Image (spheres, helix red, strand yellow):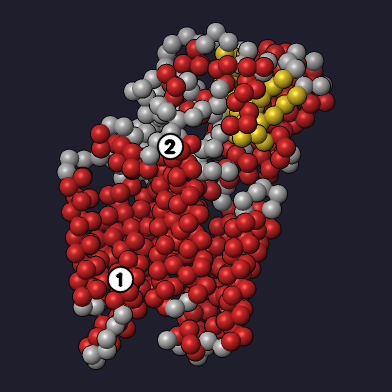
Amino acid sequence: MESLTIPTWAQLVLLLCAVGFILALKGLSGPRTARAGNLVGAGAATVACALPFFYADLDNVVLILVAIAIGTAIGVVGAQRVQMTQMPQLVALFNGVGGGAAALVALLELRTFADLDELGVDLPVAYLVATGFTILVGSVSFSGSVVTFAKLQELMTSRPVVFPGLPIAFGGAFVAALVVAGLIVGQPAVWAGVVLGLLGLAVGVLLVLPVGGADVPIVISLLNAFTGLTVAAGGYVLQNTVLLVAGTLVGASGTFLTLLMAGAMGRSVPNILFGALKGGSTLGAGQASDRPVRSAGPADVAILLAYAERVIVVPGYGLAVAQAQHTLRELVDLLAERGTKVDYAIHPVAGRMPGHMNVLLAEAQVPYEQLIEMDDINAEFKQTDVVLVVGANDVVNPAARTTPSAPIYGMPILDVDQARQVVFMKRSMRPGFAGIENELLFDPRTTLLFGDAKDSMGKLLAALKAL
């Protein structure tokens, strides 16, 4: 097989690349080491991709180099231009491209297996099973990721898309895919691989369509795990250890992340995927309320903050959209200079992906020590004078504890409602992704500061400096 033709020195280099992937994943587990971990992983991937040019007798070298050049250009331009608020969409596209590439490679290998089968060569069943698995799951990951991208980019509605017969269509496509995969194991044929790929694309679309708004990041993580598993299975088929290790790492980490995110929302993965079929999934943004609330201007809020001894800031996706993190850091620094103790409360699913708020605030040079996770800071809200909520909604909505009919019921939240005073910075009264009103907005202890987060934050900072 191919692995036997790889020189010993090249196998040792590939082993080092695999170790590099493991070290990269370890580095990504903490904010202080994340940048170094990312560089180690990228370096290991670059070496692994370049290595075959030095030991293998490759065909179509020019086409390969052209493809690499095009991919590199797209990656560089995309990385430079993408906004922080668009990171989840970028991750979704990366997931999809990885899964689609693995499916195409497996389809090409299937053609080789079909030729060998015609010659009477006895093919290992495990290789055929892995090939069918890669084509199916890779196709699911590709089409599902494209739909998640479209939802997050607002190219289509972020609300669940449900139609009569969807469960039957999904079940039928899935069963048909399993049948065709079984045919491939019995007798490999290219036509069967193509049909399997098309069925996988249909399954991916039907799987993600019923998922709404705030649940999409969890589905991205799940599809990321799918992509990792397809890469690992493809590595097994190709007898490529680096692909096997890298895919296993991505699959395992993606699975753990999916379960952790689902736990942070107090729901199961099946409920997130299929809850909309019975009306239980996140339903997307609803209508703004016309109930009266207490609002104030920047000067009034500045006075409230100036006399506070303990302040907690709760950042959300609205902060990322407004790109107000730098002004927020200036505000917090000014409060700290006045003797106020200030921390940031980070919910596990704040923003649109795990770590979104951490990265956003790190970009503004916020010290890591001020970023406190939900479980560690919830007990402090009772002793907090003012909580400043910037662009968050569902992660502080008491309905998660009090309203069984709410789509976020059971989701662990930040106990903001236990603070002495709450200031909400919002554009409008429009609900969050869950599409339900936040009763905390109507609490007598809550003051709303309406407007764009960056503009309001700038005015609040100026008012505080003037005191």
Out of 9 and 35, give the one closest to the viewer.
Answer: 9
Q: How far from the left and from the top, in percent, is residue 25?
A: 59, 58
**Residue 212 picture location, percent across and down:** 36, 38
Looking at the rendering, which quadrant does residue 43 occupy?
A: bottom right
The mark found on residue 129 in the picture is 1
How many C-alpha atoms fall within 10 Å of the one at disc 2: few (<14), some, or many (≥20)?
many
Q: How far apart are marks 2 and 1 (CA)?
A: 35 Å
State the residue at coordinates (81%, 21%). 339
Residue displayed at 26% across by 56% down: 202
Q: Quadrant of residue 288?
A: top left
> What kind of residue is marked 1?
Val
Q: In this view, does 442 lie to the left or right of 156?
A: right
- N-term mark: 2 or 1: 1
* SS for callout 2: helix
Q: How crowded is mark 1: few (under 14 residues within 10 Å), some or many (20 or more)?
A: some
Side of 316 where 32 appears, left or right: right
Quadrant of the rendering where the C terminus is positioned: top right
Left or right: 276, with 13 as reference point: left
Q: Which residue is painted at 66% across and 39% down in the image?
A: 361
